[in-house]
């Protein structure tokens, strides 16, 4: 009888030990889960780029202007071999708040057309510029009108339109940074840039 009781007690301890081990196993399984939840927190660091992006929202308006009038592509930069032709092409000037070609501007365009006819493989970009008066948007639009007026006259003189492109810099690239009538007069212009040969 004592053996049966002793066997029962021993079996009870073994069963209790097995249950206790199972509980320890459960704790071991739960511990990695708790660690994995703490490991999942680092993505909060990935949320920091909006703070880095915040300065982009505070940048001045020229970004918007650039998106409306993007700069010319890199392949359209002036080429070094065309320096002689570039030096021969003359700027034209405009009256205040006007894109009409004066007699002097038309005479200059005739000379530019003759030079361009001697080198028919060259493409030209006509850049329109304004003085500092007026809003950025208005001056960008006026610069396009001035460059387009020059382009249209050159096509009337026999230069194929596919050799000519137009861009406006508005008031962004003054020749004279002054704030007087002399500076304004030289800043209201169209320039001719050799793009490719």
Image (spheres, rainbow, N blue to C red):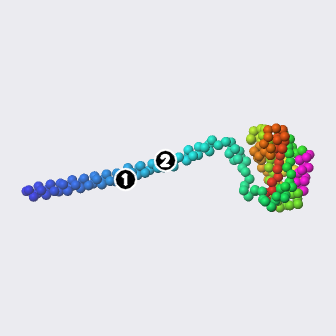
Q: Nearer the viewer, residue 17 or 80?
A: 80
Q: Give the total number of marks visible in the rendering.
A: 2
Mark earlier in primary sequence (2, 1): 1
Q: Quadrant of the N terminus?
A: bottom left
Q: Quadrant of the C terminus?
A: bottom right
Residue lying at 86% horizontally and 57% vertically, measured from the top left: 116
- Name which quarter of the figure residue 119 lies in: bottom right
Whole-percent x, y for residue 105 in the image: 89, 47
Disc 2 element? helix
Residue under circle 2?
44
Cα distance in 3D space between marks 2 and 1 = 21 Å
Most common secondary structure along the magenta stretch: helix
Disc 1 element? helix
Which residue is at the far left?
A: 1
Whole-percent x, y for residue 66 in the image: 70, 47
Q: Is residue 51 visible?
A: yes
Magenta stretch?
A: 103-114
Residue under circle 1?
32
Q: Is residue 162 visible?
A: no
Residue 191 is left or right of residue 18, and the answer is: right
Residue lying at 37% horizontally and 53% vertically, measured from the top left: 32
Whole-percent x, y for residue 186 in the image: 84, 44
Whole-percent x, y for residue 16 in the image: 21, 53
Q: Residues within 10 Å of mark 1 (few under 14, many from 20)?
A: few
Residue lying at 48% horizontally and 49% vertically, measured from the top left: 43
Residue lying at 91% horizontally and 46% vertically, measured from the top left: 104
Q: Nearer the viewer, residue 42 or 180?
A: 180
112 in magenta = yes
């Amino acid at each position: 009888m004592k053996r049966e009781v002793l066997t029962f007690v021993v079996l009870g301890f073994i069963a209790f030990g097995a249950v206790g081990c199972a509980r320890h196993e459960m704790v071991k399984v739960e511990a990695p889960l708790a660690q994995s939840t703490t490991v999942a927190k680092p993505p909060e660091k990935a949320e920091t780029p909006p703070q880095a992006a915040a300065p982009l929202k505070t940048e001045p308006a020229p970004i918007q202007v650039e998106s409306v009038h993007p700069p010319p592509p890199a392949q359209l930069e002036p080429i070094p071999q065309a320096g002689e032709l570039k030096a021969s092409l003359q700027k034209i000037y405009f009256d205040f708040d006007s894109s009409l070609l004066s007699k002097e501007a038309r005479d200059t365009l005739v000379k530019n057309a003759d030079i361009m006819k001697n080198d028919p493989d060259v493409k030209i970009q006509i850049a329109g510029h304004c003085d500092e008066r007026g809003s950025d948007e208005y001056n960008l639009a006026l610069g396009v009108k001035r460059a387009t007026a020059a382009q249209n006259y050159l096509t009337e003189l026999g230069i194929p339109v596919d050799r000519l492109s137009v861009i406006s810099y508005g008031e962004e690239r003054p020749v004279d940074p002054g704030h007087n009538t002399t500076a304004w007069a030289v800043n209201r212009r169209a320039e001719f840039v050799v793009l490719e040969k």
